[in-house]
């Protein structure tokens, strides 16, 4: 282990990183390779996992808190889907969130326990806005950059060639960019070396460039070696990166390689590296940009000692703040204290602790579901709770020995409660499922006294911090009856899953279920006449229990619902159930959006006429925005009006196309 670092007591020295696209080679592979190298340099280990928590090398095994100290998630396209403390790296410009779906991708960030900054004010403030009133999250504390382990090569101008690496995205669409025009111009000079994929998505992206050399493998070291050979690196940023003051990995690679850096006007570089780099202004004309690069190359050739002094200065700055080794050391030194701070924030000093009864529903016997229920309660970080396995009486009689053995082997004592989930006919094969509300009403009557109650469906999994988040919320907010988390909708083995935050009891959607375990109720505030309605509802039992008060939503997504396994199943009449609920607690039909990002309501303005330079893309954006706004407001009549208006204007779209 590195001499300057000793692993803190209680930590494993092993962390995981999510590889989101395991079947393709991407820039994340280079980041992961460098994280592995940095971890090994410190005597630690970095392992790769799939987005759902499965080990990359052993896909039948899921990561647990016993395996790693934390998970590092590098991308915003997927939420957390594993029960381990999770960091998400804020490495992307804000523009990317808008392009990929701002609400969805931003909300994905909040499923993680904490954030890793890369010193971008825009990226940090993006998260800061979302957690500013949160009792479960704090703005980022740690920094980590898409960097390298440490200095690799001493300062050298190598072959006095200009290194550039990239994909040349514009080649995929036939478009042009200022970077592309600059590279075309530099390609004629003979001092440029271009590296990148030869084929990308079936296109020869660097076709026609004389300066193109070859593809560099994503192994964490080859890129740096090639930069060192060239000696001078051209580091360019996209407009989105400049706006968010985010620097690409090329700056860190080039400094670690000992090369002289020619950088654009990205404020990150100027702010942190100052006069240790050479700069160009890419807002100038193409001629001006190319002339500025030429002058820098000539200056370096005639002032090599001064140029090498700049490289040495840049490396000194890099070593003090930007190496992956330093970032990991800083994180590990303060990690345990950070977790304690977050937990203290959730618990709230002086608040009375809540005793919680957790009811694990098992209407039909399944050893897999039973084991999953047991695993969920065994890992809970909250300790003042009593789990109860609520099993169908007939299933309990038929599988008693298996159930008793499973409960006896549980590390946490679990009570057994037998209820009739079904009404039986002349033979056991003829059975009718009882309403879920009737089951829950019976369970509430037979439960031991507790301050709060939770019901976990057979298709749900709760994370280890679930009870802590909800019980802490009720403890902090003594006047509230119901609190809830968001849920993660697991769609089979697909890597991208959704977050369900909205609570809308008006119309349930099997493709986006609200779930049951996400709700925790304060028992003392359940209405006394709950028996008048609860036994007569089925899938909206949570609505009746929540009626008469608001639902306080917390940021964490601590419940995973397997949407391929519907619960409950069978026919039911939603209209009749809505009418019953309306007569008992109509206020529960108010929509609760939690931390869902809601745009202001949109009116229905006339679409622009062809004379206003109408573009098809603008029309499509108009249509999408109007439809989203109407769907959010639930205004069916206005949707009909929108359809009529679109039909009337369809000829304009065709004309513009």
Image (cartoon, helix red, strand yellow):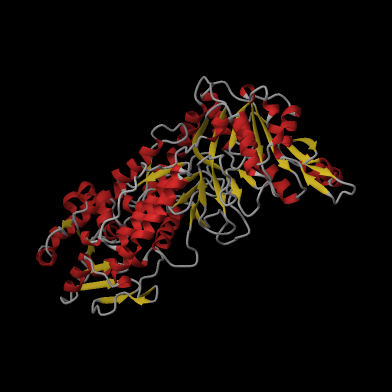
Q: Give coordinates of residue 625: x percent, y percent.
A: 37, 51
Q: Is residue 310 above or below residue 548?
A: below
**Residue at coordinates 72% horizontally, 31% vertically from top-left?**
441
Q: Is residue 333 above or below residue 442?
A: below
The number of discs equals 0
Q: Give coordinates of residue 201: x percent, y percent.
A: 39, 73
Q: Give coordinates of residue 579: x percent, y percent.
A: 62, 36
Q: Is residue 509 visible?
A: yes
Tell me the quadrant of the picture where the C terminus can be found.
bottom left
Nearer to me, 626 or 646: 646
**Left or right, 62 with reference to 442:** left
Q: Is residue 358 above or below residue 429?
A: above
**Residue at coordinates 69% horizontally, 49% vertically from top-left?**
569
Q: Is residue 3 visible?
A: no
Q: Give coordinates of residue 371: x percent, y percent.
A: 71, 47
Nearer to me, 578 or 567: 578
**Left or right, 513 with reference to 187:** right
**Left or right, 593 with reference to 461:** left
Nearer to me, 593 or 90: 593
Q: Where is residue 228, by image quadrant?
A: bottom left
**Residue at coordinates 19% horizontally, 70% vertically from top-left?**
181
């Amino acid at each position: 282990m590195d001499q300057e670092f000793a692993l803190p007591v209680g930590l494993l020295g092993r962390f995981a990183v999510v590889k989101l696209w395991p079947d393709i080679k991407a820039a994340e592979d280079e980041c992961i390779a460098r994280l592995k190298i940095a971890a090994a340099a410190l005597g630690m280990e970095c392992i790769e996992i799939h987005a759902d928590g499965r080990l990359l090398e052993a896909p039948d095994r899921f990561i647990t808190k016993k395996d790693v100290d934390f998970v590092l998630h590098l991308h915003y396209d997927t939420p957390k889907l594993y029960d381990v403390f999770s960091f998400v790296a804020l490495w992307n410009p804000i523009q990317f969130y808008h392009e990929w779906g701002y609400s969805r991708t931003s909300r994905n960030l909040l499923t993680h326990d904490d954030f890793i900054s890369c010193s971008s004010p825009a990226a940090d403030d993006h998260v800061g806005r979302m957690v500013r009133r949160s009792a479960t999250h704090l703005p980022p504390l740690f920094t980590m950059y898409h960097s390298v382990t440490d200095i690799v090569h001493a300062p050298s101008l190598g072959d006095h060639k200009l290194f550039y690496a990239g994909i040349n995205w514009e080649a995929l669409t036939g478009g042009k960019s200022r970077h592309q025009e600059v590279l075309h111009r530099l390609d004629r000079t003979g001092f440029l070396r271009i590296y990148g994929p030869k084929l990308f998505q079936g296109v020869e992206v660097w076709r026609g460039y004389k300066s193109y050399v070859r593809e560099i493998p994503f192994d964490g070291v080859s890129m740096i070696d090639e930069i060192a050979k060239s000696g001078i690196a051209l580091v360019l940023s996209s407009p989105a990166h400049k706006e968010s003051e985010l620097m690409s990995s090329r700056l860190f690679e080039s400094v670690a390689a000992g090369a002289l850096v020619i950088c654009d006007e990205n404020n990150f570089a100027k702010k942190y590296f100052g006069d240790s780099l050479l700069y160009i202004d890419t807002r100038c004309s193409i001629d001006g940009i190319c002339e500025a690069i030429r002058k820098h190359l000539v200056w370096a050739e005639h002032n090599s000692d001064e140029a090498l002094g700049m490289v040495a200065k840049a490396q000194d700055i890099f070593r003090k703040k930007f190496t992956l080794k330093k970032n990991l050391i800083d994180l590990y030194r303060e990690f345990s204290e950070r977790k304690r701070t977050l937990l203290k924030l959730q618990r709230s000093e002086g608040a009375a602790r809540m005793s919680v009864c957790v009811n694990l529903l098992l209407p039909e016997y399944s050893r897999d579901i039973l084991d999953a229920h047991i695993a969920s309660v065994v890992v809970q970080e909250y300790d003042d709770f009593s789990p109860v396995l609520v099993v169908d009486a007939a299933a309990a009689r038929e599988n008693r020995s298996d159930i008793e053995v499973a409960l006896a082997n549980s590390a946490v004592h679990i009570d057994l409660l037998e209820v009739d989930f079904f009404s039986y006919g002349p033979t056991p094969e003829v059975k009718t499922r009882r309403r879920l509300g009737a089951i829950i009403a019976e369970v509430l009557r037979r439960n031991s006294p507790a301050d709060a109650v939770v019901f976990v469906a057979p298709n749900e999994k709760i994370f280890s911090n679930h009870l802590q988040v909800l019980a802490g919320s009720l403890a902090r907010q003594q006047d509230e009856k119901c609190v809830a988390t968001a849920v993660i909708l697991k769609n089979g083995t697909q890597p991208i899953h959704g977050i369900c935050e909205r609570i809308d009891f008006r119309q349930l959607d099997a493709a986006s279920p609200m779930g049951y375990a996400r709700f925790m109720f304060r028992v003392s505030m359940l209405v006394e006449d709950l028996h008048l309605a609860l036994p007569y509802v089925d899938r909206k039992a949570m609505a009746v229990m929540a009626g008469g008060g608001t639902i306080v939503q917390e940021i964490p997504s601590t419940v995973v619902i397997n949407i391929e396994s519907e619960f409950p199943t069978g026919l039911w009449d939603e209209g009749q159930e809505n009418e019953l609920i309306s007569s008992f607690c109509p206020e529960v039909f108010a929509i609760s959006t939690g931390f869902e990002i809601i745009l202001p309501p949109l009116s229905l303005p006339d679409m622009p006429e062809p004379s206003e330079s109408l573009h098809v893309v603008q029309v499509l954006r108009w249509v999408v925005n109007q439809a989203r706004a109407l769907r959010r407001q639930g205004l069916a009549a206005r949707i009909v009006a929108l359809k009529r208006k679109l039909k009337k204007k369809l000829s304009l779209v065709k004309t513009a196309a």
